[in-house]
Amino acid sequence: MSSTTDASTGRATIAARTLRTDRWWLPPLATFVAFVAWVAYATVRAFMQDYYFVPEYGYLTPFYSPCVSTGCVEEASHFGRFLPDVWWLPYAAVSLPFLLLFRLTCYYYRKAYYRAFWLSPPACAVAEPHQRYSGETRFPLILQNAHRYFFYIAGIITLINAYDAVLAFAKPGGGFGLGLGNIILVVNVVLLFGYTLSCHSCRSAVGGRLNHFSKHPVRYKLWTQVSKLNTRHNQFAWATLVSLAVTDFYVMAVSAGWISDLRIVG
Ligand code: FES
């Protein structure tokens, strides 16, 4: 197999699209199917405006947190109700767009959807169909640089999710309650913290721009911990997609009366 180099691109000119013989197309295809399914589910749920809260146990789905529409039931609204109740506005419209932007600009998701949706490139050592490549240097992709700001907002929203999970241990009539829903809410929050704290922007915020780690022992310690989490960021990215969907579905199923919550205490 002979090849020469294209002087304009610096790339090897190879007639075949790829010389890979493995099933390189499987990961991007699986990513494509999973993302489309998840986004379809999340969109339906975000606009459903029902089955988002279980009043008996205080379970609030993260898809409706914080619930700030005048359409929200009062017990689910921990931060006031000030958005109009119209069909096209999700009850958690103050958080969902930022969560979407946080994930859309995430370094890992970028890799995943550039491969799965834009085929740019679909896999390592597989030629992409596009003739030109400008990276993320132009509009709109240059906006990916805003990721660090969405990180801070997502951090606040994760704290709100944690607050919801803690509140759910208090039964509305008074006393402590524990059910499978509480466990699911807590696991989801732990994974959300894992995803948020393992963010590359978090690593940069904690330990970036330091010339001498020895002069900043606390930040160095934090940076080493965040760096460890950071190596698992892609796993947290997928785990939180699953945990968010499972948490939401469980709350919907209990709220709709399809299943009963498995109670352990109270
Ligand atoms: Fe993935 Fe920040 S959330 S890199």
Image (cartoon, rainbow, N blue to C red):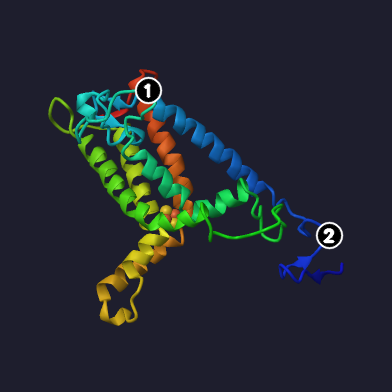
* Of pointers 1 and 2, the one earlier in the residue sequence: 2
Residue 133 seen in the figure: yes
Residue type, label 1: Trp
Q: Secondary structure at mark 1?
A: loop
Quarter of the rendering containing residue 47: top left
Few, some or many residues within 10 Å of mark 2 (<14, 14–19, 20+): few
Quarter of the rendering containing residue 125: bottom right
> Is 190 or 93 nearer to us in this picture?
93
Q: Secondary structure at mark 2?
A: loop
Residue 233 seen in the figure: no
**Which residue is under mark 2?**
15
Q: Residue at x 32, y 26 (%)?
A: 261
> Is 18 or 140 nearer to us in this picture?
140
**Which residue is under mark 1?**
87
The quarter of the rendered structure image containing the N terminus is bottom right
The location of residue 246, given as percent across then percent down, is: 42, 35
Give left or right: position of 165 versus 3. left
Task: Give the vertical position of 216 relative to 185 (above or below).
Answer: below
Q: Residue at x 36, y 71 (%)?
A: 208
Q: Residue lying farthest top?
A: 257
Give left or right: position of 119 versus 151. right
